[in-house]
Image (spheres, rainbow, N blue to C red):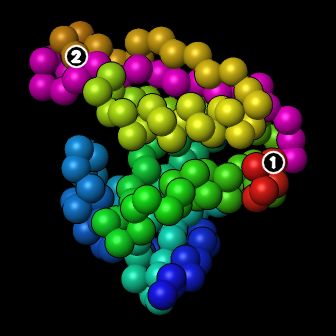
Amino acid sequence: MDRKITLRPPTPEDGVRVHQLVAQCPPLDPNSIYCNLLQCTHFSGTSVAADIEGELVGFISGYRPPQQTSTLFIWQVAVGEKARGQGLASRMLVNILARDECKEVDHLETTITEDNQASWALFQGLADKLQAPLTQSPQFDRELHFAGQHDTEVLVRIGPFKQPVTTEA
């Protein structure tokens, strides 16, 4: 039996649960619980929590950079094991883009390491749904920015796309 997944803006009470979910989703980089609390409060309008019967099974954090208000930057996408293989990440992204907080957004950005095939597929699929081009360029270099401790992060930019985005996208 399929259980219904509810998508909603996160709340402060989700902070610890987000921290736990991210820890269960390697290779995601964990943030502090305090950072997750800020994501769930300051950025709740551009982030999404996914629940199955009250259990947090998905979370996306995003924000609109102050210098690029027509861009939504997706910080992190986490989908727990119980909810994988159901297109949840894509539905969560569309949920955010369809909100009033994003009505002026016509570009989406994120960073992805070269070997993260799941993320590449997710964002290419979103670009296809939005009928928008996807471009990529180096953002944070392994040696220059991470002192060799993290793989290079590639900036992925999707857009421009038409507004309003609907949940049918």
Instruction: Look at 14% across and 17% down and name the residue there.
Output: 147
Q: Main SS type for the magenta part? A: loop
Q: Residues within 10 Å of mark 1 (few under 14, many from 20)?
A: some
- Disc with the residue nearer the chain's start (2 vs 1): 2
Marks 2 and 1 close (CB-CB < 8 Å)? no
Above or below residue 36? Residue 1 is below
* Count of number-bearing discs: 2
Range shown magenta = 145-164
- The residue where tag 2 is placed is 142
Nearer to the camera, 86 or 89: 86
The x, y position of residue 43, in whole percent, is 56, 56
Q: Is residue 158 magenta?
A: yes
* Mark in front: 2 vs 1: 1
Residue 91 lies, in percent from the top left, at 61, 58
Indicate the position of residue 163 as horizontal and vertical percent values: 86, 41
The residue depicted at 82 percent of the width and 41 percent of the height is: 104
Q: Mark 1 sits on what residue?
A: 165
Secondary element at image label 1: loop
Q: Vertically, is 108 above or below 57? A: above
Q: Amino acid at mark 1?
A: Val
The reply to whether residue 44 is visible in this rendering is: yes
Most extreme residue toward the front, as rendered?
Answer: 1
Structural distance between the alpha carbons of marks 2 and 1: 35 Å
Q: Quadrant of residue 55?
A: bottom left
Q: Is residue 82 left or right of residue 156?
A: left
